[in-house]
């Protein structure tokens, strides 16, 4: 407060000037007005929240509609990272904004911005952790879709077998040999497709996927039914993408020049002495998600030394047992198609006859084996009760 007589500054509220002792009238020198501003920290918190929500929506597209954007693509991982960073920053800035406003003595406002920046990220995190959230049940939805695919293949399998003397699909002829790729997947005739030495030899070369492709050729199964939506970057086979525009998929012989890019499933070894027929036990495993001990187009085979069944006498724990599961469903298990055409999501890979491991060759000459030996190109089942679900290796890396 300024003294009107001597001009000296005095402490606000005093009644007498400290310099000239003149009585002061507080009403003649009102306090200066306090400028109230919106907290910039609170505004920044709200902006970060909005950015997080936008990228969260993009992440949902990746998780819930893998045909638009696959959940393991770089774009999807980037949107998830931005969502995490933006909402985390919003929460920190929102709390800082609330503290600034509360301690400013009325000089700062913007409670609504700060509260929005604080509460919205918390609600978002709780929603993500909820079992009924989109991201909470996405893997279960993918399991169901994958199981539906295999169920449709199973029904087609029975139809095919009834038309071919109870034999399940086997490409290449009765003496065919397993190779990684057909001699010609787009050939005009069977002899060129399988590389027969003469039309009656039946000694061709065929991939595992070529046997599955017979469902497309002769049983009306669509190529998209062989794609598990949780199998990293696998896409539906479309001939036109490989320059074949004048022929339908049913006129071809395999899922293109690199079948593992278009087929997510492993099939019981069709070439050799233990070819499947409907005379096998109904609980025999026929097909399932990709074999974890064989390379996929985007990942190396698993480390078999880390796998141990969690049943006697092997003494493994839950984690070691899960190492033997298919990678497509986060090692939680695998969808398995059995000979009676029913599909089951098996929590362990040893779900075949006699606790047989469906992904390995049994070490017994007469029964199944929960552990077994990991397969390679050319492996054969050890006996008629040994399921050996295999898939073709990917094209060599350049």
Image (cartoon, rainbow, N blue to C red):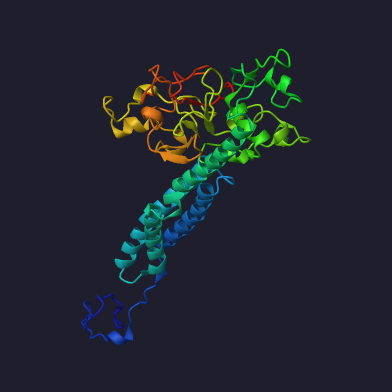
Q: Quadrant of the C terminus?
A: top right
Relative depth, front residue between 110 and 246? 246
Q: Residue at x 28, y 75 (%)?
A: 9
Q: Residue at x 49, y 37 (%)?
A: 340
User: Where does the image place residue 244, in percent across and percent down from the top left?
Assistant: 75, 33
In the rendered view, tell whether residue 333 sits above or below residue 358: below
Give the number of marks.
0
Is 223 placed left or right of 266 in the picture? right
Q: Residue at x 58, y 30 (%)?
A: 166
**Image-quadrant location for residue 211:** top right
User: Where does the image place residue 66, in percent across and percent down from the top left?
Assistant: 55, 45
Q: Quadrant of the N terminus?
A: bottom left
Is 396 placed left or right of 97 in the picture? right
In the rendered view, tell whether residue 12 sits above or below residue 175: below
**Image-quadrant location for residue 362:** top left
Is 77 placed left or right of 250 in the picture? left
**Image-quadrant location for residue 246:** top right
User: Where does the image place residue 225, in percent across and percent down from the top left?
Assistant: 59, 40
Can residue 167 be seen at all in this image of the molecule? yes
Relative depth, front residue between 246 and 163? 163
Relative depth, front residue between 183 and 383? 383
Q: Residue furthest top?
A: 197
User: Where does the image place residue 11, in percent across and percent down from the top left?
Assistant: 24, 75
Q: Residue at x 63, y 39 (%)?
A: 221
In the rendered view, tell whether residue 99 sits above or below residue 273: below
Can residue 289 be seen at all in this image of the molecule? no
């Amino acid at each position: 407060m300024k003294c009107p007589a001597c001009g000296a500054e005095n402490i606000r509220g005093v009644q007498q000037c400290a310099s000239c002792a003149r009585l002061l009238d507080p009403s003649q020198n009102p306090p200066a007005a306090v400028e109230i501003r919106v907290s910039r920290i609170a505004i920044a918190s709200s902006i970060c929240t909005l950015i997080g929500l936008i990228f969260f929506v993009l992440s949902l597209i990746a998780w819930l509609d893998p045909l638009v954007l696959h959940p393991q693509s770089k774009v999807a991982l980037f949107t998830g990272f931005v969502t995490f960073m933006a909402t985390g920053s919003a929460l920190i800035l929102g709390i800082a904004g609330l503290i600034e406003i509360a301690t400013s003595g009325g000089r700062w406002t913007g409670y609504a911005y700060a509260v929005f920046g604080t509460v919205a990220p918390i609600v978002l995190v709780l929603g993500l952790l909820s079992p009924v959230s989109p991201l909470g049940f996405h893997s279960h939805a993918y399991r169901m879709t994958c199981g539906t695919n295999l169920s449709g293949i199973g029904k087609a399998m029975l139809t095919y077998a009834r038309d071919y003397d109870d034999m399940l699909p086997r490409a290449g002829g009765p003496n065919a040999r397993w190779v990684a790729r057909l001699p010609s997947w787009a050939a005009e005739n069977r002899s060129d497709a399988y590389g027969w030495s003469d039309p009656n030899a039946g000694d061709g070369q065929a991939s595992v996927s070529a046997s599955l492709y017979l469902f497309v050729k002769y049983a009306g199964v669509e190529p998209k039914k062989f794609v598990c939506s949780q199998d990293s970057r696998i896409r539906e086979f479309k001939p036109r993408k490989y320059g074949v525009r004048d022929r339908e998929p049913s006129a071809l012989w395999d899922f293109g020049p690199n079948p593992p890019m278009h087929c997510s499933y492993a099939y019981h070894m069709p070439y050799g002495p233990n070819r499947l027929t409907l005379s096998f036990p109904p609980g025999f495993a026929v097909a399932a998600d990709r074999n974890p001990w064989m390379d996929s187009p985007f990942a190396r085979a698993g480390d078999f030394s880390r796998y141990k069944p969690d049943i006697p006498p092997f003494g493994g724990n839950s984690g070691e047992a899960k190492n033997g599961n298919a990678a497509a469903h986060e090692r939680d298990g695998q969808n398995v198609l059995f000979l009676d055409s029913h599909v089951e999501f098996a929590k362990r890979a040893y779900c075949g006859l006699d606790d047989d491991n469906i992904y390995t060759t049994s070490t017994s000459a007469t029964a199944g084996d929960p552990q077994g030996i990991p397969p390679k190109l050319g492996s054969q089942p050890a006996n008629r009760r040994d399921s050996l679900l295999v898939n073709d290796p990917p094209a060599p890396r350049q």
